[in-house]
Image (spheres, coloured by chain):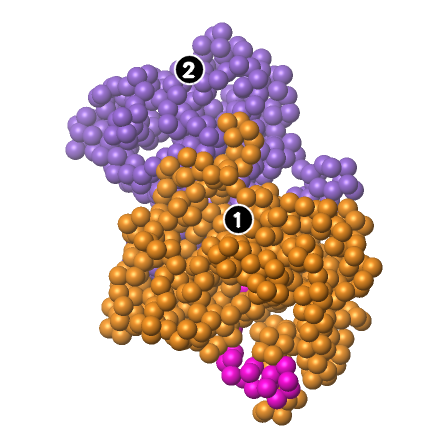
Chain colours: A purple, B orange
Amino acid sequence: MVDPIDPTATGFLLAENRNMPMHVGGLQLFEKPEGAGRGYVREMYEQMRDVEQVAPLFLKHPHRSVRTAGQLVWQPDEQFDIEHHVRHSALPKPGRIRELLELCSRLHSTRLAWERPLWEATVIEGLRDGRVAMYTKTHHALVDGVSAMRLLASVLSTDPDERNMPAPWALRPRAPRQQRPSDDGGASLADVSAATVRTALAIASEAAGMPGALVRTLNKSVRNETSALSLYAPRTMLNQNITGSRRFAAQDWPVERLRAVGKATGTTINDVVLAMVSGAMRTYLLDMDALPETTLVSMVPVGLNAKQSQLASSDGGNAVGAVMVQLGTHLADPADRLTAINTSMKDGKDGLSAMTPTQILAMSALGQAPAILGPVLRMQGIVRPPYNLIISNVPGPRTTHYWNGAKLTGTYPLSIPINGMALNITCTSYDGKMCFGLTGCRRTVPHLQVLLTHLDDELKALERAAGVR
Amino acid sequence: MVDPIDPTATGFLLAENRNMPMHVGGLQLFEKPEGAGRGYVREMYEQMRDVEQVAPLFLKHPHRSVRTAGQLVWQPDEQFDIEHHVRHSALPKPGRIRELLELCSRLHSTRLAWERPLWEATVIEGLRDGRVAMYTKTHHALVDGVSAMRLLASVLSTDPDERNMPAPWALRPRAPRQQRPSDDGGASLADVSAATVRTALAIASEAAGMPGALVRTLNKSVRNETSALSLYAPRTMLNQNITGSRRFAAQDWPVERLRAVGKATGTTINDVVLAMVSGAMRTYLLDMDALPETTLVSMVPVGLNAKQSQLASSDGGNAVGAVMVQLGTHLADPADRLTAINTSMKDGKDGLSAMTPTQILAMSALGQAPAILGPVLRMQGIVRPPYNLIISNVPGPRTTHYWNGAKLTGTYPLSIPINGMALNITCTSYDGKMCFGLTGCRRTVPHLQVLLTHLDDELKALERAAGVR
C-alpha cells in the first residue's frame, strides 16, 4: 500500500539536511494526579507506549525506490517498533527547568530517520517540583507545529476524573475528539482537527507548486512596497547559515498582564507579544553590539477567515497568511515600539486582505516554507533576508485540561530554525497563560536563555509605560 | 590554521551517512568514592566540563570550502562550546542496567555534527546500584574504538587516593600518562598512546589508497582459498543494509572462567570468546529459523608484532591484521565448535604471517574500513559478504583503576555496524573481567539483548564440555 506525498510535504523532506532538521516539537508539563504512586511516570509511559492500535499518520514513513520511479511516497512501516518512538527519560539532579530545557534542546537537535514513521515522544521524569514533562517531535511533512500541538491537545479532557484516555498516536473511532459541554467553547484546541490545519499545508503546497505565481507576487511586492511583504529587512546575526544543534528556552506569563497593557494602550494581546519580543531582541542585540540601525522585521503568520481569504476549504479550515511586521527595534522607548508594531500589524493585515487569493497563497507559501523558497528568492536576486525572525502566536484552550487525571500546567512549542532564520519564537495561550517557546540554532543564537529575562523585563517596562503597574 | 586529513579519516568521513554514523563509543561504570555527597555526579560532570585547556584532537573539526579546493581539512573550532560536548544525563526509575543500555543505544544512534569537534561525553546518574556511568562517543576519523578506550584509560590511575586528575580531553603536558610503579606492568591500557593505535589507521590508509594492491590480494585469496580471507561466508539476516538506529547490550564474565575452559581444552581465552559468540549466534539464529547450513565467518582483528609483520612503525606500534574465522555455527556440539574455532584461528594466523606485507596491509584495510571498500568488492563482482560479523577482543588493564577516587568497575565498547554487517561484538578485558559490548542495527538485529543470555548459557555449556564445572 503506497500513498503519494503531497508537494509541500515532499518539499519539507527534500529541504531537510543535517543542519536543518524539519521537525516541530512540543513540551508539555503535567502535574501528577492526587494519590499518584512512586511508579506513576513509568505507568504513564507504559500507557503511552502500549496503545492497542496506532493511527495511520503515525505508521507511515517516506520511501523512494526504482519501483516508485524515484518519487517519494508514504509507505506503512512493516516493522513498526513502538519502543523506538515512545521513550522514557529522566533529568539529572537538581531537576530544575534548566535541566529540562537542556534535554529538550538535545532531543530537538537530532533528526528523524526516514526508515521509520516520522515522530518521537519522550516522557520525562525527575523534575524537582514533581511534575512530569513530555517532549514530542513530529516531522513537518506530517503536521505543522500548530497541528502537532492541537493533535496532542485533542486527546485531553477538561474532566480531571476521566480515565482510559488514549495516547495522541492511538487510533481513535473519531479523529477529532468531540467538544465537551463542560468546555467553555472558547478557542479550544480540541475543536480543531489535524485535518483542518493540514489544509494550510495543502494550500501552501499549491503555492509551492507554482513558483511563477510566487515570483509575480514578489515582484509586485517590490514595486508596491506593501508592508505585507518586506524585502527591506536589515542583515543581522540571526540571518546566517545555521548548524544542526538547537537551544530551546520556554517560559509563560499571565495573559491577564498582557491584556491589561493592551487595554490601556488600545493594542491587542498579539501586539503586546510582539512588543515583548521587540524589546527583548533590542536588549539582546545591543548587548552583543549587533543592533541594526533600521528596525528588525518579523514574519507573523495570521489566520484569515473564509470570507476574507475566499480560500475556505471544504472542511471549513482557515487559510493562513503572513504579515511582515516592523518591530521598531530602532526605537528606544517601549511605548513607541508598541505603537509602531500596532500600526505595522494593521497595515500588514489591510494589505493582506487587499491581496488576490493567489497572492495570499504565495504569502502562505512564504510563511510555511521559506526553506523551500530560499533558492527561488535567490534566483530573483533578492539577497537580503525577507525578514529577520518568525514570531507566531497560536491561540490554545482557555480552560484547564487533563490527561488521565494529570493536569496540564503548560504547553510550549519547539519550532524549526532554518538557514538565514536562526531564531523562531512561537507562543501559545493556555489556561490563562501565554506560553513562549524560543527555538534557535545553538551556535548562531548564543545565550538564548537570556532572552527569557529580557522578555520579562520588557513586559514590566510595557506595564509601566501603560500605567498599569 | 588548517591540517590535512589523512586518506583513511577522509574515507570514514565520506563513507558516513544517516544510516551509518561512523563513531565509536565507550561505556564506563564507576563506583563513587567513599564519602561522596549527594551532589557527587554533578561535581564529576563539572570537573569533566571545566577543563582548563582542551587537547587539539578535541578542538578540530572537518571543513571543506572553495578555499580548501574542495578538500576536507581539519580546522580548529573557533567557537568551541564545551557544554555541547560534555553532557549530564540521568536514567528513569528504576535505574537498572536495562535503562542504561537503552539510553546508550539512543546516544549511539545520533550522528556527530561536522561543524563541531567530533566527540561527545555524557555523565549519567540514576543507576539504582549507585554507580555512575559515562558514555563517550568519538568519530572514527579521530580515533578507532581501541584507541578511544585507551585514551580514556590513559587518564586513569591505580591509586584510589589520587585527585585532580584530568578529563580525557584535557590538554596534558605529556600525552601518554607515565607508567606508575604501582601498576602491574601487564597489558595496561595506560602504556599505549593514542598515537600508537593511530598507526593502525595510517597503515590502513595506505592500503585504502591503493585499491590495486587490495584487488590483487582479493584475487589471490579467491584462487588460494586462504583462510585468512574468506569469500565464502553464507548470507544471513545480519548481512543486509542497515538503518541509523542502534541497539547496545553489554555484560561481563570473569576472565578466570574463560581461562579455565581454555586450559582444560588446550585453546586460548580468545578462542573461548569466539566460541561463546558462536554458540550464542547459533541459538539466536535457530530461534529465528535463520541459521545457515554452512558456518558463519567472523572477521577477527589480530595484532601482529613488528617482526612478524615487518610493518612496525617508527614509534614501535603494532600492525593490525584480520583473520577470517569459521565459527562452526553449523556444529551442534559446543566442544566441536571450540575445536573448529581453534583450528580456523591457527590456520588464519599462519596464513596471515605467510602473506606479504602488502597483502597484510590490504587485509588491514579490509578490517578497518570495510565500509569504504564495499564498492570495491562489488566492483569485483564479489556479491556474497566477505564475512558475517566482526568480533574484536582488545586486552585492557589487569588491575583496578580509578578516576579521582571513583573506581572503574567495567568498560564496554560500542562499535560501528555498517551496511551488510549489522552486528559488531567487541570485548575488552579489565580487572579480571571479560567485558562484552554488542552493537547492532536496531532493525536488522532484533532482540539484541537476548544474546547476553545466550552468551551466558554458552559459557556454561563450554564449562560442562571442558569438565571444569
Chain under disc 2: A
Q: Write the residue at 39% across / 29% down.
A: A238
Q: Are marks 2 and 1 in contact (CB under 8 Å)?
A: no
Q: Is residue A47 visible?
A: no
Q: What stretch is highlighted in magenta?
A: B247-267
Q: In this view, does B87 lie to the left or right of A378?
A: left
Front in this rendered view, residue B237 or B306: B306
Give neighbour class at mark 1: few <14, some 14-19, many 20+ (Cα, 10 Å): many
Up-down relation of residue A373 to residue B354 (above or below): above
Front in this rendered view, residue B414 or A344: B414
Classify residue B364 by image quadrant: bottom right
Return the x and y of residue B283 as percentages of the image width and height. Answer: 69, 76
Circle 1: residue type: Ala
Classify residue A361 by image quadrant: top right
Residue corresponding to mark 1: B141
User: In front: mark 2 or mark 1?
Assistant: 1
Assess whether residue B256 is covered by the magenta stretch. Answer: yes
Circle 2: residue type: Tyr
Residue corresponding to mark 2: A232
Q: Which mark is residue B427?
A: none
Give neighbour class at mark 2: few <14, some 14-19, many 20+ (Cα, 10 Å): some
Q: Write the residue at 46% across / 56% down.
A: B194
Assess whether residue B16 is covered by the magenta stretch. Answer: no
Answer yes or no: are tags 2 and 1 on the same subunit: no
Return the x and y of residue A310 as percentages of the image width and height. Answer: 57, 21
Q: Can residue B159 be seen in this view?
A: yes
Q: Is mark 1 on a helix, strand or loop?
A: loop
Up-down relation of residue A283 to residue B25 (above or below): above
Return the x and y of residue B103 as percentages of the image width and height. Answer: 47, 61
